[in-house]
Amino acid sequence: MNNSSKNKLLFNVIIIYGTVAVGKFTVANELHKLINYKFFHNHHTYDLSRQLFERGSLYGGRIIENIRIMLFKEIAEAKINVITTHTYSPKFVSTTGLSDPMYMKKVQSIIERKGGRACFVHLFADEKEILKRVSGESRKNHMKLKDKKIMKEILKTDDWELPAPVKNNLQIDSTNLSAKQVSNFIIKHFNLS
């Protein structure tokens, strides 16, 4: 089998991850427009859980994890091209005991077992830019953090520039880049169409 026919059999799942307010949704949305992959935002599952359970509860954590894992399994089974986002923290452990690094490895494994390619994109930016973005208009449509003071505290709690321990992991400093520039870089790096 030649390389071009092999690539046609694969499906891609692009996981754009990073800290709160780094621009994951904005980049994912722009990328969706450019390559027309299906797009689901991590807040789709988070918002559903918040309708029923308190933030940080075991029940809410289980709902979020179970739905996300089920979605990745169904995406892999259907072999469809998808873009999604994830707020990643190297030290985060959910109420179920699943750490963020292990979650990312689990997602990668689900996709690869079905012949897909997990394309991880780690976005980061400097603190000043993140604090500017956190109060942006686009954050009001989803129940997202908009408070600069809280964001400052979040940035102190973890090393947000540490990448997830996964393969196919592109790191992009988006401080001075537009969403379109970042998207074009992702397309070129992963040879997406």
Image (spheres, helix red, strand yellow):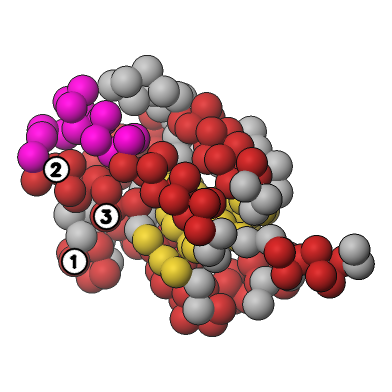
**Image coordinates for residue 119, horizontal then vertical, percent:** 63, 54
Q: Residue at x 18, y 27 (%)?
A: 59
Provide the secondary structure element on which disc 2 rests.
helix
> Tag 1: residue type?
Asn
Tell me how far mark 1 sits from mark 2, CA to CA.
15 Å
Question: Of helix, strand and loop, which one carries label 3?
Answer: helix
Residue type at mark 2 is Arg
Residue at the extreme bottom of the image, as rendered: 34
Residue at image mark 3: 44
Tell me which numbered mark, 2 or 3, is placed earlier along the sequence: 3
Q: Nearer the viewer, residue 26 or 134?
A: 26
**Residue of label 2:** 50
Is residue 57 part of the magenta span, yes or no? yes
**Residue 62, visible in the rendered structure:** yes
Q: Residue, x 30% and y 57% (percent of image)?
A: 134
Query: Of the numbered discs in the image, which one, if any, rests on residue 141?
Result: 1
User: Where does the image place residue 55, in percent across and percent down from the top left?
Assistant: 16, 34
Q: Quadrant of the N terminus?
A: bottom right
- The answer to which image quadrant residue 7 occupies is bottom right
Farthest residue in the right direction?
2
- The disc, 1 or 3, on the residue closer to the chain's N-terminal end is 3
Which is nearer the eye, 82 or 139? 82
* 10 vs 43, nearest the viewer: 10
Residue 42 part of the magenta-drawn span: no
Q: Which residues are magenta?
A: 52-66
Q: Position of residue 178 (x, y in %)?
A: 51, 75
Horizontal placement of 128 versus 76: left or right?
left
What label does residue 155 carry, if any? none
Could you classify mark 3 by the number of other residues whose Cα lies within 10 Å: few (under 14), some (14-19), or many (20 or more)?
Answer: few
Residue type for callout 3: His
**Which of the two marks, 1 or 3, is nearer to us in this view?**
3
Q: Is residue 173 visible?
A: no
